Amino acid sequence: MTDAVDPAPACGTVLASLRQARDVLDELLAGDAAQRLGAISSAVAACLRAGQKVLACGNGGSACDAMHFAEELTGRFRADRPALAALACTDPGHITCTANDYGYDEVFARWVKALGRPGDVLIALSTSGNSPSVVRAVRAAAERGLVTVALLGRGGGALRGVCTHELIVPGDVADRVQELHMLALHAVIEAVEHELFAGGGRTSPPPRAGVRPAASPAAPAGP
């Protein structure tokens, strides 16, 4: 039988962490985050409505946030609705091949060059705004006519003011920045779903680019 664990020593650390998370969220809400996220949501909804796709990339925890965001578009967020086209750059084959042959800084840019099309949206996540691989991905996306969205922290770094849309969140450490990034991405998904489905009354998936809707079957001939 094990001795009971005393939670008291950890409580102070946990409480301080929760309060810090609340403080940075309050700081975010005091600015223009709602307007910026509204513009990002409308851009993503317009992309998907046109049959385009959303790409997302980041490193470490930001890569996990990119995956989380993409799966809630292709899979499910809160309610049933048609699948939406989204993809995160997390394929080990692509990443290791590109890093080995071209250097790690090219892993996301090379992916954008392969998959990005004019009218697609790239969501680039970086807690510092200075990650060379993310900066190069944004540059490649802009050159190919993609709408670029940056979720940044710590003042925005090298990506500040570069993308079509950006949200720079407060926070002095990466984990607080990433928590706000994921909250922002969830808000975007909720707004996109409302705009595409609940708000607009659409019940079928957006059409794929270049694909005509199937014609309705002809009524059977009479006797």
Image (tube, rainbow, N blue to C red):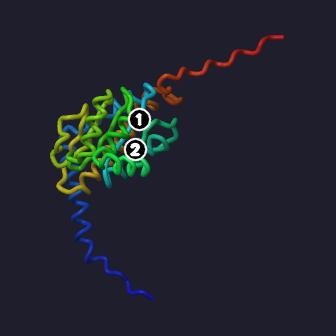
Image spot of residue 192 (x, y percent): 39, 34
In the foreground, 98 or 133: 98
Left or right of residue 31, residue 106 in this image: right
Q: x and y percent of residue 195 in the render?
A: 40, 30
Badge 2 is on which residue?
88
Q: Which mark is residue 115?
A: 1
Question: Percent x, y for residue 69?
Answer: 39, 45
Q: Which amino acid does label 2 sit on?
A: Ala
| Residue 37 % position (x, y) | 28, 37
Residue at 44% x, 50% y: name it: 93
Q: Quadrant of the C terminus?
A: top right
Residue 19 is at least partly visible in this image = yes
Identify the amino acid type marked 1.
Answer: Leu
Return the residue found at the far bottom: 1
Please say if 45 is above or below 11. above
Under circle 1, the secondary element is helix
Q: Residue at x 37, y 36 (%)?
A: 191
Q: Is 6 drawn above or below residue 116 in the view shown?
A: below
Residue at the location (35% across, 51% down)?
100
| Residue at (47% x, 36% y) in the render | 84
Quadrant of the image occupied by residue 20: bottom left
The answer to which image quadrant residue 162 occupies is top left
The tag earlier along the polypeptide, 2 or 1, is 2
> Nearest the camera: 98 or 171?
98
In front of the other: 1 or 101: 101
> Quadrant where the N terminus lies?
bottom left
